[in-house]
Amino acid sequence: MSAVIDSHHDDHHHGPAKGLSRWLYTTNHKDIGSMYLWFSLVMLFIGGAMAMVIRAELFEPGSQIVSPEFYNQMVTNHGLIMVFGVIMPAFVGFANWMIPMQIGAPDMALPRLNNLSFWILPVAFGILLSTFFMEGGAPNFGWTFYAPLSTEYAPPTVTFFIFSVHIMGASSIMGSINIITTILNMRAPGMTLMKMPLFVWSWFITAYLLIAVMPVLAGAVTMMLMDIHAGTSFFKAGGGGDPVLFQHIFWFFGHPEVYIMILPAFGIVSHIIETFSRKPIFGYSSMVYAIASIALLSFVVWAHHMFTVGMPIAGELFFMYSTMLIAIPTGVKVFNWLSTMFKGSLTFETPMLFAIAFVALFTIGGLSGIMLAIAPADFQYHDTYFVVAHFHYVLVPGALFSLLAAAYYWIPKWTGKMYDETLGKVHFWMSFISVNLTFFPMHFVGLAGMPRRIPDYAMQFADWNMMVSVGAFLFGISQLLFLFIVLKCIYNGKAATTEVWEGAKDKGFEWTVDSPAPYHTFSSPPSMESLKSSS
Amino acid sequence: MEARKSTLKLILFTFGMFGFGFALVPLYDVFCDITGLNGKVTGPTFTTYDKEISSREVKITFVTSNNKQMPWSFKSSSPQMKVETGQDYLMDFTFTNTTDKPMIGQAVPSVSPGRGARYFHKTECFCFEQQFLAAGESITIPVKFIIDPELPDDISSLALGYTLFDVTEEFANLQAKN
């Protein structure tokens, strides 16, 4: 409409630049969002390849393919890449694409900062991955890099690791400042905080968590750097320091970090479930309060990762009860998702399938989390495959499924084309079956005492491990199918409508713009009236 | 501008949290001191107790171990002793530098159960300073300690553990200056 009026200058200002410089210099939130998403997809395949090496080694007991030293490097870098290189940047990618469109803003508040926070990420991971080609090999101390394993006993490449973590942290912090500033200042007129879409709410809180804990992580790695190179003794017992202090600082960052990786997923799943149930979300305000209370509680539960370090009984009890408290707001969310579906007119397109699988499987991960929160029982589970099963259930069919669901849900709006629904469903069922085949038996071997992070295992675990490895290979192949579906959608998809999903027009501003979304949207803010019919 | 204000506030908050990360280091020590958590023992204490206070017998176990990179031999003269609370005792520890170069060692104490740490008073201990030993040199130093009569009744034995660290590199500079 407005294109007709000012078409004479449209060609000069409104299109993207051509060639490589478009991507290098872009300050457009959609371009930057796409780069984040492609980056995390590439990292998913790199981190996934490492997981395949791990599962190939564990296919049979005994030393098979790689040396124990290389196995340790695989375990460490698989964790680091999946956490910092896949899940976090992918959520930031969705935030970049969707937050301005969902709140009716023309772009992010700080577009140049946005460009910088993306472009330092490939630098950080370039540094991390380059350590594989250095003397001493890549970091091998686990993604939790406990001192003194990561200081006195670390390979010399640990310094590269430290700088890479600094850069990743800077990227996340800049991204978060941008997101909060955007949400606080650029909402469409009439969109009060309690009228914001839930994805925006979940990111608003996540961004606060990020700027609260990423600096603490930066502090922790700075202390490591000083212990290694400047002769300080933060974590050296010989010099009056304390290795247990490292674990406290790390998990003060680490526990909010795990919620950073799941809260945006809550927002995404809420949108998808309400769209495909053709009902407004059940209990909107309780959803907001639940996210906020999970975020607040995340700061007082960190020592449940360290029950076995020798805490006094009062500490064990405090962290046990505070951890279990988190089950309440999480339960509220699951209840609300189920209630949203209750008596809705449901259809099961691929995003909805992934979202429903998210609710079911994330809950399994949550329940094993409660088992782990029981301090006396944790002494048995600690550092076994039960823990591996737990956090993979919340991160793979949890965070990763929500990302896949979100990609299917919004890709028609981004590309203007529909993905292949049949292939999408094949991708879902392959992923769903293989993810359970991979991670469910880990509960059994874990309870039977199989330790994590060890390249070999006792004979009695052989059958389950072979099943797990088969599941893992299948899951890996399924994600290659996802890549194919995305490419097919971009180059060969059927045109999508403006609304894309039936009834979606009332669900948010992003469904009121053309498909594909124009390079610039909402140069003048939309009115809340256009969404009124939903209530 | 509104956006500028919120950005500045957030940047300030970020730096504040970076500082907080470092503040956790002293906070952690203070917290452990106050609560006696973590089996951490404090510096020398000079207390005597009224002999009238009813005392009881406590078994003390001495554990010595070396950090991985420390080649010295490090032993207590006896693995255990029975003591009365409120009275002074001595236990000898022998350090031997088994290498052919001068080295500096530092013993770091820990008491278990951790709850008992605050009742284990050391009036003299080699752990308050470093040991400088020439190649092959051997030295015997006592630890002087009192067990607080306030020790909770359910604790009938305490273990005093020392881990010996090689701090030659860290203290070489200091040594050269003196």
Image (tube, rainbow, N blue to C red):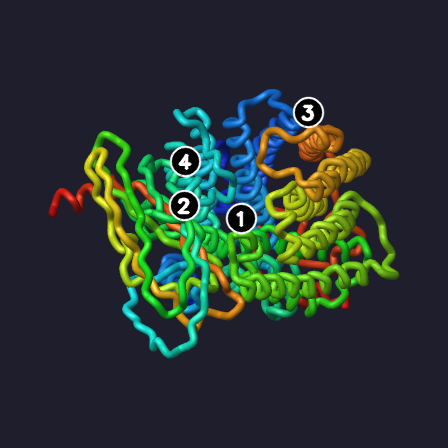
Q: Determine crowd level at label 1: few under 14, some 14-19, many 20+ residues with C-alpha closer than 10 A.
A: many
Q: Earlier in the sequence, mark 2 or mark 3?
A: 3
CA gap, disc 2 and disc 4: 18 Å
Q: Name the chain under label 3.
A: A
Report x, y in % for residue A292.
60, 65
Kindly indicate whether the residues beneath marks 2 and 4 are on one polypeptide chain: yes
Instruction: Tell me the residue that label 4 is attached to.
Output: A154
Report x, y in % for residue B168.
25, 40
Mark 4 vs mark 1: in front: 4
CA gap, disc 2 and disc 3: 38 Å
Instruction: Tell me the residue that label 1 is attached to.
Output: A29
Instruction: Tell me the residue that label 2 is attached to.
Output: A166
Q: Is residue B100 above or below residue A32?
A: above
The quadrant the C terminus of chain A occupies is: bottom right
Q: Is residue A355 above or below residue A456?
A: below
Q: Determine crowd level at label 2: few under 14, some 14-19, many 20+ residues with C-alpha closer than 10 A.
A: some
Q: Secondary structure at mark 1?
A: helix
Q: Residue at x 55, y 29 (%)?
A: A71
